[in-house]
Image (cartoon, rainbow, N blue to C red):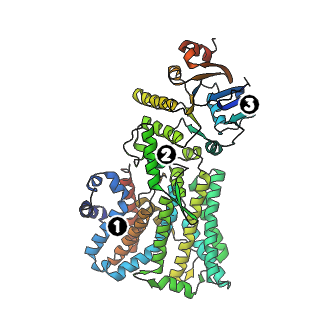
């Protein structure tokens, strides 16, 4: 699968990662197309989370190449990945409870005004921007000055996603974005991901939920026991086929 | 010793004063508001109680003396606040003050001049803070343990350097610093005010401040977003050390000599002021005005009790009671 299509936003080939004697995955080829929602599914321990962490710079793969936006091996840590244009929506959300919605949206990329050698936060501009970021994705929160601690799980997830998208990221990576959410909140977050798809944001979605994956994604990659087992178009597959691919019955 | 009960009516009167301002009436029903403003409420309460019980308390001379006495604690509380905001604690703070004072005294006595002595003292205490932060982050050792260790180490170092003897510091510069005044306040008060303003701006109006609170709030999340949390922690401890150096200069100026003795109440009161100021000991939530007013409140408590001829033996008891009370109120902080 080394023939990479030219419209891939990210592509990797021959990727391997070991932790001591434990193989997370070996010789994995994977790619995500620009403007599509690409899903990665697999059983627990299939290696999908580790693969994603390699893509976003948390882990450095032992072997193989990653090409992001036409550049090879573009980064070696999460900060580098972020600067290159990959934003991650973490499983544990990575929001700071005690900070406000606006502060969280601009965390570590705060807008500043420079006065001589000093840089002061431009809080007005950040609040204004935060409002427009939230309204662009039709996200409702009581107030952008609200501490995140008081928000519901769905609102928190929405803010995580909004932060990722709002940074002008070329690729948004979501690891189990609805795992901890109730039915209504899951529906809200799915609607949000659909809006991203309409706006042609490139998304990689890691999920356990086959129905959700078929509803939301364009292309589905299946991992099994540390290998990339298959890839299918979401429109051309069925839930049963996915189950068979994940369990190895196919 | 009826502070808790005395506080109740006082709290109401403070509330009435607040209510006249717009949009605060809703806040007043929120226990979280009282937790956030515990130090202000407590200070206003103490001022009213002591003012009634002993009118001398409200005399200009006494208030000026009170502010002067509070300056050192205010500066230390600010340093402690930065550390506590990262969910750490700096137990070596008072020991660093002692070492700073001794270095100041020794360098001055060696004839290098008072300015170099002061600069070296601040550099030394900042280095101690830096070292604290470095050991905590690089060694992944709990803050409590590391600063307890440096507390002991610095104390020993101070004793070795000074030979256990106090050093007289006869400097006109320090004498002026301690006794001179500009406008209504003595110079030490201005130093404390300047520290409050700079720290407030650093906490609320810079990226460092946001990153500090993020590091204290959820260190893994902050790290995942690319914030260099170890650097932030080291910076917080270095700031704490720097504040200890400033406090050392103020202390030597005040007593005229460098004593190889730790003022333990300075350490405990700095933590107490931080707690009173509504700063969460779990990190992530801090203000500068709160701890500064907390420090004022603790100084006012001691000052008032002294004016009322209450034995000095009762003062730690009163401080302890107030701090525990404040911690209980903090439970309502949301």
- Residue A21: mark in rendering: 3
Q: Write the residue at 36% across / 80% down.
A: B62
> What residue is shown with label 2?
A105
The residue nearer to you, when weighing B130 against B163, is B130
Residue A249: percent from left, percent from top:
63, 11
The quadrant in which residue A10 appears is top right
Residue A167: percent from left, percent from top:
54, 43
The quadrant in which residue A136 appears is top left
Q: Write the residue at 68% across / 26% down.
A: A5
Q: Write the residue at 50% across / 56% down.
A: B85
Q: CA distance from mark 3 to mark 2?
A: 39 Å
The residue nearer to you, when weighing B159 against B278, is B278
Marks 2,1: beta carbons within 8 A: no
> What residue is shown with label 1?
B43
The residue nearer to you, when weighing B25 against B248, is B25
The crowding category of the residue bearing disc 3, from other C-alpha atoms within 10 Å (few below 14, some 14 to 19, many at least 20), is few
């Amino acid at each position: 699968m080394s023939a990479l299509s030219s419209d891939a936003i990210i592509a990797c080939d021959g990727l391997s990662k070991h932790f001591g004697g434990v193989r997370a995955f070996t010789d994995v080829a994977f790619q995500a197309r620009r403007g599509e929602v690409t899903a990665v599914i697999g059983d627990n321990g299939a290696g999908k989370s580790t693969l994603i962490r390699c893509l976003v710079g948390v882990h450095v793969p032992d072997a193989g190449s990653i090409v992001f936006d036409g550049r090879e091996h573009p980064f070696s840590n999460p900060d580098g990945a972020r600067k290159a244009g990959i934003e991650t929506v973490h499983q544990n959300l990575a929001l700071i409870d005690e900070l406000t919605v606006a502060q969280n949206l601009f965390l570590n990329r705060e807008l500043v005004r420079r006065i001589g050698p000093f840089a002061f936060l431009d809080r007005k501009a950040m609040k204004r921007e935060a409002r427009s970021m939230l309204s662009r994705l039709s996200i409702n929160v009581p107030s952008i000055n609200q501490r995140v601690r008081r928000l519901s799980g769905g609102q928190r997830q929405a803010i995580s996603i909004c932060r990722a998208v709002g940074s002008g990221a070329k690729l948004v990576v979501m690891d189990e974005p609805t795992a901890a959410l109730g039915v209504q909140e899951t529906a809200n977050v799915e609607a949000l991901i659909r809006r991203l798809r309409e706006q042609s944001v490139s998304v990689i979605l890691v999920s356990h939920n086959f129905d959700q994956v078929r509803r939301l994604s364009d292309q589905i990659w299946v991992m099994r026991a540390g290998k990339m087992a298959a890839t299918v178009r979401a429109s051309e597959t069925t839930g049963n086929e996915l189950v068979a691919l994940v369990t190895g019955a196919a | 010793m009826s502070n808790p009960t005395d506080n109740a009516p006082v709290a109401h009167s403070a509330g009435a004063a607040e209510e006249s301002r717009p949009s605060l009436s809703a806040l007043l029903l929120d226990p979280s508001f009282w937790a956030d403003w515990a130090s202000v409420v407590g200070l206003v309460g103490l001022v009213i109680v002591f003012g009634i019980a002993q009118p001398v308390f409200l005399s200009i001379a006494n208030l000026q003396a009170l502010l002067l006495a509070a300056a050192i604690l205010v500066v230390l509380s600010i340093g402690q606040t930065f550390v506590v905001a990262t969910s750490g604690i700096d137990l070596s703070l008072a020991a660093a003050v002692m070492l700073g004072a001794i270095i100041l005294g020794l360098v001055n006595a060696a004839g290098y001049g008072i300015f170099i002595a002061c600069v070296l003292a601040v550099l030394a205490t900042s280095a101690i803070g830096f070292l604290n932060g470095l050991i905590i982050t690089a060694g992944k050792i709990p803050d409590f343990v590391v600063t307890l260790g440096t507390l002991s180490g610095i104390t020993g170092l101070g004793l070795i350097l000074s030979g256990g003897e106090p050093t007289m510091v006869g400097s006109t510069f320090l004498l002026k610093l301690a006794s001179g005044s500009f406008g209504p306040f003595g110079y030490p008060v201005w130093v404390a005010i300047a520290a409050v303003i700079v720290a407030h701006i650093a906490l609320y109006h810079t990226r460092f401040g946001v990153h500090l609170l993020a590091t204290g709030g959820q260190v893994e999340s902050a790290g995942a977003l690319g914030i260099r949390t170890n650097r932030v922690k080291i910076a917080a401890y270095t700031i704490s050390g720097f504040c200890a150096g400033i406090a050392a200069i103020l202390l030597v100026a005040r007593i005229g000599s460098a004593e190889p003795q730790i003022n333990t109440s300075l350490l405990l009161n700095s933590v107490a002021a931080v707690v009173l100021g509504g700063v969460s000991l779990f990190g992530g939530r801090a203000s500068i005005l709160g701890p500064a007013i907390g420090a004022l409140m603790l100084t006012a408590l001691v000052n008032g009790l002294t004016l009322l001829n209450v034995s000095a033996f009762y003062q730690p008891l009163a401080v302890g009671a107030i701090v525990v009370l404040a911690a209980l109120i903090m439970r309502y902080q949301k």
